[in-house]
Image: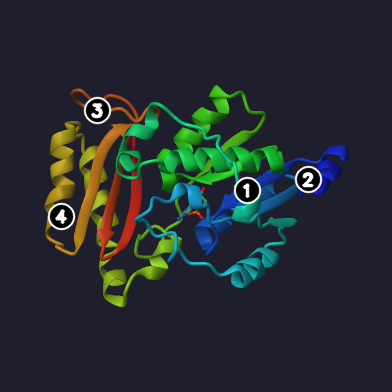
Amino acid sequence: MSDLRKKWQDEGLKVGFVPTMGALHEGHLSLVENAKKDNDKVIVSIFVNPKQFGPNEDFDVYPRMIREDADKLKGLDVDAIFLPNAADMYPAGFQTYLTNSAMSKVLCGAYRAGHFDGVLTVVLKLFNIVKPTRAYFGKKDFQQFRILSAMAKDLMLDVELVGCETVREADGLAKSSRNLRLSEEERQIAPKLYEAMTALKAAYSDGLRSPDELLQVFDKLIEEIPQFKVEYAKLLSADRLEDFESNINEAAVFAVAAYLGSVRLIDNIELG
Ligand code: AMP
């Protein structure tokens, strides 16, 4: 990868980079399409990063399907697929981690100890290897995108981060590698999450600005479906991920994490 990257640098080429954990779906592929539009070359990495999973999380059962992934990427004419392995990324003696001290405290960060340290650390390592001109991330993982953007700004990285819209199934369910682990029954129920989120957004569009009253719109609908175990459902400012003290008065994000059986779904919707 280093040799290839040096060659492209010498040729003055712009390189777009899409980091993923594989089990690729149309969400990932939309990032690749965006990267292809803006750059001369596109590199996709596939690495299920052990450092961003907690001890009781789904690292062992996370879907891995490298052959199918490679075929999909070949179909899109990607220039290189980077497949690091954990022993190379984290050799014995590895001891340095990155931390975000503000936005990582809320939403997923409040429930997944160390998760964003793992994400920040692996993404910075990947940036150092791949040296992208631009890197593409999905706003499906809104908090992740915000935290990585803060990293790029705070550490003065020479890379442009591009946030891409969430790609959904026809019934509204946000595409996710974890959807593969839903049972048939759970898959039927799953889109109700986005339905309830959309109802909250409709109330916002009708002029409702009280966070409590907006959350009630979502809660009322989601409570009708006992299979959902909501971990969090929060309205925060979109740029800093902070609570609103009173009514919503700037761009906001409504972010949700909910379990369906053993599968943890996350989704969000931007307001204003
Ligand atoms: P992952 O493989 O889950 O780590 O995701 C790799 C990248 O794809 C991240 O930047 C995600 O935010 C993005 N991504 C995942 N699902 C979607 C989706 N449904 N729409 C757009 N981007 C997505």
Q: Are marks 4 and 3 in contact (CB under 8 Å)?
A: no
Q: Are marks 4 and 2 in contact (CB under 8 Å)?
A: no
Compared to 12, does 169 lie above or below? below
> Viewer-nearest of labels 2 and 1?
1
Report which quarter residue 94 is drawn in: top right
Q: Residue at x 17, y 55 (%)?
A: 222
> Viewer-nearest of labels 4 and 2?
2
Residue on which the image places disc 4: 221
**Of label 1 and label 3, which has the lower sequence position?**
1
| Residue 46 visible in the snapshot | no
> Viewer-nearest of labels 1 and 3?
1
Q: Amino acid at mark 4?
A: Leu
> Viewer-nearest of labels 2 and 3?
2
Q: Residue furthest front?
A: 93
Q: Could you classify mark 1 by the number of other residues whose Cα lies within 10 Å: few (under 14), some (14-19), or many (20 or more)?
A: some
Q: Amino acid at mark 1?
A: Met
Q: Residue at x 53, y 56 (%)?
A: 48
Report which quarter residue 81 is drawn in: bottom right
Cα–Cα span, label 2 and label 1: 14 Å
State yes or no: Cβ of the residue under disc 2 lies below 8 Å from any atom of ligand 1.
no
Q: Residue at x 35, y 39 (%)?
A: 109
Cα–Cα span, label 2 and label 3: 47 Å
**Of label 4 and label 1, which has the lower sequence position?**
1
**Of label 4 and label 3, which has the lower sequence position?**
4
Residue on which the image places disc 1: 89
Residue on which the image places disc 2: 2
Cα–Cα span, label 4 and label 2: 51 Å
Residue on which the image places disc 3: 248
Q: Could you classify mark 3 by the number of other residues whose Cα lies within 10 Å: few (under 14), some (14-19), or many (20 or more)?
A: some
Q: Position of residue 24 (x, y in %)?
A: 54, 63
Q: Amino acid at mark 3?
A: Ile
**Of label 2 and label 1, which has the lower sequence position?**
2
